[in-house]
Image (cartoon, grey):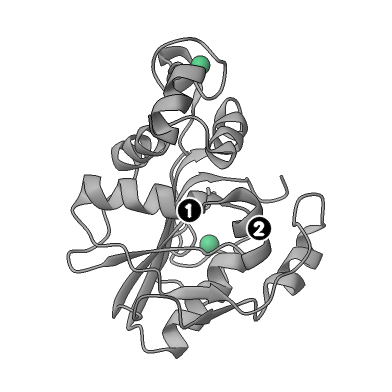
């Protein structure tokens, strides 16, 4: 019996947020997930008062970023369950929510997961952004390119102030992953926090030859949240 089959026996399918037996995201939790309310910033996808190309919080490099839901209600628990990794079916379920809420990347784009640092990859055994990218790639019919690596690893970001997070992320990523940098690269991550990580990834991809870099995340922490 393979490990997956053993885990299936140990952990029958249940909602990643509330634990209700059945779907990976139950109907009640699904309806409690709220997409960002338009108008959205054309650059980073943040909720803005009036439609703009670029909001004041936008950090260059990105041709556009979108997120399926706000990081509130059941979203944090779903992200935590995805990182926990024992709930199979959660990555495709979250990808389905992204596909329902976010316009697809342009044809010809490749999905580039935000990489984990080597230490965290070792501890966790997998990268939740890669799981999400693979599920999105299947849904959208787009290839996945693991084109980035961590140039260096900062301390865990949780609890750090936003400004400190920005400093930590600067220069943390570089091209030179297992796959070549695609000309049209769409970053994938579970959560969009300050945008510093996505901006740094985009800078690394652009300086390694990517013509255009966008991003798609499952959830977004509201500015100031
Ligand atoms: Zn639920
Ligand atoms: Zn913006």
The residue sitting at the top extreme is 21
Q: Nearer the viewer, mark 1 or mark 2?
A: 2
- Which quadrant of the figure has residue 88? top left
User: Compared to 32, does 1 lie above or below?
Assistant: below
Task: Left or right? Give the position of 110 relative to 16.
Answer: left
User: Compared to 8, does 147 lie above or below?
Assistant: below
Q: Is residue 142 visible?
A: yes
The one nearer the camera, 50 or 207, is 207
The one nearer the camera, 211 or 48, is 211
The one nearer the camera, 162 or 26, is 26
Task: Left or right? Give the position of 138 relative to 46.
Answer: left
Q: Quadrant of the C terminus?
A: top right
- Which quadrant of the figure has residue 121? bottom right
| x 18%, y 53%: residue | 141
* Element carrying mark 2: helix
Task: Left or right? Give the position of 211 relative to 218.
Answer: left
User: Would you name the residue on which mark 1 appears?
Assistant: 129
User: Would you name the residue on which mark 2 appears?
Assistant: 120
Q: Position of residue 211 (x, y in %)?
A: 32, 83
| x 45%, y 72%: residue | 62
* Element carrying mark 1: helix
| x 82%, y 57%: residue | 161
Disc 1 residue crowd, few under 14, some 14–19, many 20+, Cα 10 Å: many
| x 46%, y 10%: residue | 21
* CA–CA distance in space, label 1 to label 2: 13 Å
Q: Position of residue 223 (x, y in %)?
A: 66, 51
Disc 2 residue crowd, few under 14, some 14–19, many 20+, Cα 10 Å: some
**Label placed on residue 47:** none
Please report whichever mark, 1 or 2, sits nearer to the chain's N-terminal start.
2
């Amino acid at each position: 019996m393979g490990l997956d089959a053993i885990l299936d026996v140990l952990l029958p399918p249940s909602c990643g947020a509330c634990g209700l037996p059945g779907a990976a995201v139950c109907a009640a939790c699904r309806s409690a997930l709220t997409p960002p309310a338009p108008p959205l910033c054309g650059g980073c996808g943040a909720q803005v008062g009036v439609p703009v190309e670029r909001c004041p919080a936008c950090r260059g490099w990105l041709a556009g970023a979108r997120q399926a839901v706000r990081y509130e209600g059941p979203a944090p628990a779903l992200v935590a369950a995805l990182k926990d990794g024992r709930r199979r079916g959660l990555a495709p379920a979250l990808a389905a929510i992204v596909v329902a809420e976010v316009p697809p990347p342009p044809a010809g784009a490749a999905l580039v997961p935000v990489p984990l640092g080597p230490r965290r990859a070792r501890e966790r055994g997998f990268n939740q952004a890669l799981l999400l990218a693979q599920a999105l790639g299947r849904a959208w019919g787009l290839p996945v390119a693991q084109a980035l690596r961590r140039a260096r690893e900062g301390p865990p970001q949780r609890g750090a102030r936003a400004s400190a997070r920005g400093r930590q992320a600067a220069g943390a990523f570089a091209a030179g992953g297992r796959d070549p940098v695609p000309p049209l690269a769409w970053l994938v991550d579970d959560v969009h926090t300050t945008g510093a990580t996505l901006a740094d990834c985009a800078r690394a991809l652009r300086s390694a030859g990517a013509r255009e870099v966008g991003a798609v995340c499952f959830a977004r922490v509201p500015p100031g949240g």
